C-alpha cells in the first residue's frame, strides 16, 4: 500500500490500463455527488487521461444484517443520484443483486474496460475486506480515498486513547481542513458510453426489496427516508428550528432536540463539510455550536481513529488494561436480572425506560443518544457475561439502527464497557466502569413523555 496524499492510498502495484475507456469509481460509502473526495479524485484521474468517468454502486443481498430497512434507505437515494450524475456528465450504474441467481462479479467485469479503480476508504464493517479483495483481483491500480471526516485519518499515527488526547490534535489541525476542497468537473462527458452490465432503475422500492433474499422482519423506517435531498432538508430544519437550543435539548429524549443526521452521515448522503458550513453560517449561541461540533468532529473522528487503528475494534479485546482487569475481577458477580435475547429484543424487561429505548430502535431505526448510553449499560447488567452483552448490543444496533455498522457504533457500544472513558467508583458487575441506571438517569429528562411517545406509534416527522 502506498500513501499518495493525506486522503488517498494506492492499494496494489498494478499498471494502469492505458487503453481503458473510462475511470471507474466504485461508490460504496460516500453516496453523494458533491463534497466527496473519492469522486473528486476519480474525476481528476479521468480528466488527466481524457476519458469519461463511470460510477458504479451495487447493493448485494448477503452483507451482514441485510434487511428491508437498510435496503430501502439505500435505494431511496439512487434515482436522485442518477439525475445529478447525468447533469454532471458522469455515467452512473446502480445494480441490485437480489439473490443467488443474480449475475456476480459485476464490478470485476466493468473493471475490464477501465483504466483504474477509485473506491471509498471506510475503516470498518465489510469495506476494508472489499478493498483488499478488489486490489488483489483487479489487473489495474486500485485507490481508496478517505472522505469520512474533516481531518484525514492518515494524519494520526496511532490509536488515540480518549477524547482528551485527540481533541487538542484536532483543534490544531482543523484550520487546515476547515473548508472542503472544490468539487471537480469532468472534461469528457460520458455521453455515448455503452457498458454491457446489469443495472436497475429504482421505481417500486417495496417491490424490489420484497424480492431480495434478505431479512424481511426489520421493516423500512417510517421516519427516516434515504437520500441526499432528505438529508439536506433535515439539516436545514435542524439549523433553523433545533440548533439554537441544542446545548439544552440534546439530552432531552422526549423532544426532537438533536440533528438526527447520523444515518445520513453513515451512508454518506451528507458530508460532514456540508453540516459544518451550515453550522458556521448559523446565528446561534456559541455554546450550541461548541456542543454540536464536539460531537460531530471530536467524538466522531475519535471513533474513526479507533476503528482505523485497532484491529480488535469489534470485540472486548480492544478495551484498555484497567477495563480488562475490572471485568475479570467482577466476571462472577451476581446479576440482579437476567434476560433472554428474545425478551430484550422484544422490549420485555422490568425497566420501562429501557423498553422504550429498545422500542424506538426496533420501530424507527433510531435511538436518542442519551438513552442509548443507558440502553448499553443495562444490557451489561442483565446478561450472564460481558461477551454476551457485547454480542447482543452489536447485533441489535447493527440490525435495527440505520446509523449502525459504523465506527460510532463500535465506539458507542464499547464506551459502555469503558472504552475512551476513565475508571469510576467500584461496584458490582461494572467494577470501575462508569455505571448508569434508569432510576437516576431517567430523572434528567422527561422519561414519562418519552415512554408514552414510543408507545403511541405517532412518529415525529423529520421536518
Ligand atoms: C451504545 C451506543 C451505540 C451507538 N451507536 C451508534 C451508531 O451505530 N451510529 C452512530 O452514528 N452513533 C452511535 N452512537 C453515538 C451517538 O449516540 C449517535 O451518534 C447520536 O445519537 C446520533 O444522533 P444525532 O445525529 O441526533 O446526534 P447529534 O447530537 O445531532 O450529533 C451530530 C453528529 O455527531 C456525531 N455524534 C454524536 N454523538 C456522538 C458520539 N457519542 N460518538 C461519536 N459520534 C457522535 C454523529 O455523527 C451525529 O450525527 C452510539 C452511542 C452509544 C452509547
Image (cartoon, rainbow, N blue to C red):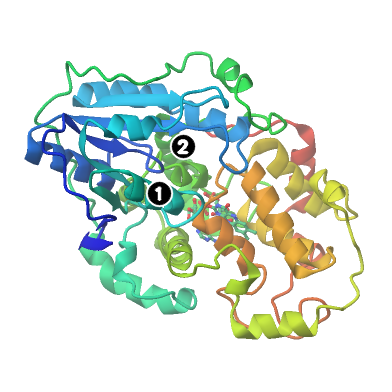
Q: Residues within 10 Å of mark 1 (few under 14, many from 20)?
A: few
Q: Is residue 206 above or below residue 57?
A: above
Q: Is residue 48 above or below residue 97?
A: below
**Could you say which is closer to the camera, residue 365 or residue 39?**
39
Can residue 447 be seen at all in this image of the molecule? yes
**Could you say which is closer to the camera, residue 60 or residue 427?**
60
Q: Is mark 1 within 8 Å of ligand 1?
A: no
Q: Is residue 439 left or right of residue 25?
A: right
Q: Residues within 10 Å of mark 2 (few under 14, many from 20)?
A: many
List the residue tagged with mark 2: 234
Q: Is residue 86 above or below residue 162?
A: above
Question: Does the CB distance between marks 1 and 2 fall below 8 Å?
Answer: no
For the N terminus, the image quarter is: bottom left
Q: Residue at x 53, y 32 (%)?
A: 73
**Could you say which is closer to the camera, residue 114 or residue 423?**
114
Q: Position of residue 278 (x, y in %)?
A: 34, 46
First in sequence: mark 1 vs mark 2: 1
Q: Is residue 418 left or right of residue 13?
A: right
Q: Residue at x 20, y 31 (%)?
A: 53
Q: Is residue 101 left or right of residue 300?
A: right
List the residue tagged with mark 1: 133
Q: Position of residue 61 (x, y in %)?
A: 56, 32
Q: Residue at x 43, y 64 (%)?
A: 308
Q: Residue at x 70, y 56 (%)?
A: 393
Q: How many numbered dots are placed on residues in this image?
A: 2
Amino acid at each position: 500500500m502506498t500513501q499518495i496524499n493525506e486522503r488517498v492510498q494506492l492499494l496494489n502495484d498494478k499498471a494502469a490500463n492505458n487503453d481503458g475507456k473510462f475511470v471507474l469509481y466504485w461508490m460504496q460509502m460516500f453516496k453523494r455527488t458533491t463534497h466527496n473526495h473519492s469522486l473528486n479524485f476519480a474525476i481528476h484521474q479521468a480528466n488527466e487521461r481524457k476519458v469519461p468517468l463511470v460510477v458504479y454502486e451495487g447493493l448485494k443481498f448477503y452483507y451482514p444484517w441485510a434487511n428491508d430497512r437498510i435496503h430501502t434507505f439505500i435505494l431511496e437515494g439512487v434515482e436522485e443520484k442518477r439525475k445529478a450524475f447525468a447533469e454532471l456528465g458522469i455515467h452512473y450504474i446502480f445494480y441490485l443483486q437480489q439473490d443467488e441467481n443474480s449475475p456476480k462479479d459485476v464490478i470485476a467485469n466493468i473493471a475490464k474496460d477501465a483504466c483504474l479503480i477509485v473506491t471509498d476508504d471506510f475503516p470498518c464493517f465489510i469495506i476494508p475486506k472489499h478493498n483488499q479483495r478488489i486490489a488483489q483481483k483487479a489487473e489495474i491500480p486500485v485507490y481508496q480515498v478517505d472522505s469520512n471526516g474533516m481531518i484525514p485519518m492518515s494524519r494520526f499515527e496511532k490509536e488515540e486513547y480518549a477524547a482528551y488526547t485527540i481533541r487538542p490534535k484536532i483543534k490544531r489541525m482543523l484550520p487546515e481542513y476547515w473548508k472542503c476542497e472544490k468539487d471537480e468537473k469532468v472534461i469528457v462527458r460520458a455521453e455515448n458510453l455503452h457498458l454491457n452490465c446489469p443495472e436497475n432503475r429504482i421505481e417500486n422500492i417495496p417491490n424490489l426489496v420484497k424480492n431480495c433474499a434478505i431479512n424481511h422482519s426489520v421493516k423500512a423506517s417510517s421516519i427516516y427516508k434515504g437520500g441526499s435531498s432528505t438529508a439536506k432538508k433535515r439539516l436545514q430544519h435542524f439549523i433553523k428550528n433545533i440548533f439554537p437550543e441544542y446545548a439544552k435539548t440534546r439530552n432531552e429524549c422526549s423532544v426532537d432536540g438533536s440533528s438526527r443526521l447520523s444515518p445520513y452521515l453513515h451512508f454518506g448522503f451528507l458530508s460532514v463539510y456540508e453540516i459544518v458550513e451550515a453550522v458556521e453560517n448559523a446565528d446561534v449561541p456559541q455554546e450550541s455550536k461548541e456542543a454540536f461540533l464536539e460531537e460531530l468532529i471530536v467524538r466522531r473522528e475519535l471513533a474513526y481513529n479507533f476503528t482505523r487503528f485497532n484491529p480488535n475494534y469489534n470485540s472486548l479485546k480492544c478495551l484498555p488494561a484497567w477495563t480488562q482487569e475490572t471485568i475479570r475481577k467482577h466476571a462472577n458477580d451476581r446479576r440482579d436480572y437476567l434476560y433472554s435475547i428474545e425478551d430484550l429484543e422484544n422490549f420485555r424487561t422490568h425497566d420501562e425506560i429501557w423498553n422504550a429505548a429498545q422500542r424506538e430502535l426496533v420501530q424507527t431505526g433510531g435511538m436518542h443518544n442519551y438513552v442509548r448510553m443507558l440502553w448499553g449499560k443495562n444490557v451489561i447488567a442483565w446478561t450472564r457475561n460481558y461477551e454476551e452483552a457485547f454480542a447482543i448490543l452489536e447485533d441489535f444496533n447493527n440490525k435495527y439502527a440505520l446509523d449502525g455498522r459504523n465506527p460510532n457504533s463500535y465506539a458507542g457500544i464499547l464506551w459502555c464497557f469503558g472504552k475512551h472513558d476513565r475508571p469510576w467508583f467500584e461496584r458490582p458487575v461494572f467494577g470501575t466502569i462508569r455505571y448508569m441506571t434508569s432510576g437516576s438517569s431517567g430523572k434528567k429528562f422527561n422519561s414519562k413523555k418519552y415512554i408514552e411517545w414510543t408507545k403511541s406509534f405517532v412518529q415525529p416527522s423529520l421536518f
